[in-house]
Structures are given as C-alpha cells and as structure tokens.
Amino acid sequence: MSFSVGAEQFGWVPMPPWLARRVGNLAELDGSLCGVVDLRVEAERYAFFTWSGGGAGASWSMRCSIHLQNLPRAISDEFVEEQVVVPLCSAGRKVLLATGRHKVFAYDPERVAMERVFSMEEFVDIPDGHREARLLLSIALHEESIAGVHLTLCLGL
C-alpha cells in the first residue's frame, strides 16, 4: 500500500509473490521504492530491488546484489549477525547502506567492493559494562539546492 502526500491518496504497489515472500525491509533509494532481500542463508548475499512505478511499464528490477563471499573477510563478518540492512542513497557508483548495528557502509557494485564509512560506537562513549546498550542511530538524508549549489546531507545521531 502506498500514500501520495501530494495527492493525499492511497494506492497499491503490486509485488510479484516470489518477491513479496522474500522482502525483509522497504526503503527509498534515489527516489524509488527499494525492497531488501536477505539471501544469506542460501546464497550468502543481499539483493536490492527497485520499483519503477507508474504506467503500464511499471515493474520491479534488481538494482544490485551484494555477494558477501566476494568481500574481504573483515567486512563480510560484520554482516553475519545483521538483522537489518537498509539502503540510504547512492553517491556516484556507490550505494550507502545502514545496518541495525549502527554502522554505515559504502558498496561499489562495479568494483564489487565495500568499505565501512563509520560506526556510531566510534563517536559515542559507552560506559564500561554497558557495551550491549542499544545505541540510537538516526540517519536522515536531505537534498537541497541553495543559490544554485546542490547539497546532500547525511546526519547521524
């Protein structure tokens, strides 16, 4: 189900049954609805499908796929316990991803390379004995053009 803020109207985004059964999270990626499919158990990968909505040619297509076995061991190990992986935006050819463990990664599908951008634990002092305390990470993306200069802000809190 969708809601258009501008038209103040509900709508429907059809999803093929094979995809509907697999999507774990929905997010917005570069202006499109994005479904995250966790295929770690059977294929050691994540797949990101985007919706090209509207009109007769509307469809879901794979935006990119992250094969964890092709990444450096240190990076792929960080995804073993993840429950949530959400795409934030793309910057050039890279896709920024946030995780439920309060980390942000940049994935380059052309080079099949990923790097950790930051972890909130690097910026928040957690008292000894409370390492398991849940950090609150909120990432907001905001695009704006001021005096003809295009800005993209990514905020962590």
Image (cartoon, rainbow, N blue to C red):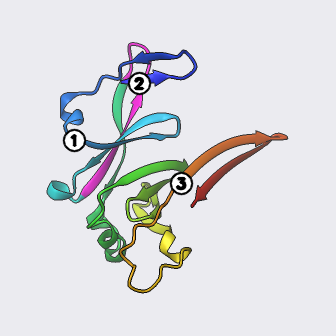
Amino acid of disc 1:
Arg
How crowded pointer 1 is (Cα within 10 Å; few <14, some 14-19, many 20+) is rated as some
Q: In the rendered image of this protein, does residue 35 appear above or below residue 74? A: above
Is 57 colored magenta in this rendering?
yes
Task: Reply yes or no: does residue 71 show up in magenta.
Answer: no
- Residue 102, located in which quarter of the rendered image? bottom left
Residue 129: assigned label: none
Give the amino acid type for the residue marked by disc 3 in the picture: Ile
* Between discs 2 and 3, the one toward the N terminus: 2
Image position of 106 (left or right of 112): right
Q: CA distance from mark 2 to mark 3?
A: 22 Å
Q: Earlier in the sequence, mark 2 or mark 1?
A: 2
Which of the 4 quarters of the picture holds residue 21? top left
Label 3, secondary structure: give it: strand
Expressed as whole percent of the image width and height from the top left, the position of residue 63 reads: 39, 42
Name the disc covering residue 2, or none: 2
Contact? badges 1 and 3 (CB < 8 Å): no
The foreground one among 121 and 136 is: 136
Task: Inspect the image, locate mark 2, and give the three-letter code of the amino acid beneath it.
Answer: Ser
Image point 37% across, 71% down: which residue? 75
Q: Quadrant of residue 132?
A: bottom left
Eyeballing the image, is 52 above or below 29?
above
Residue extent of the magenta highlight: 45-58
Which residue carries the number 1 mark?
22
Q: CA distance from mark 1 to mark 3?
A: 25 Å
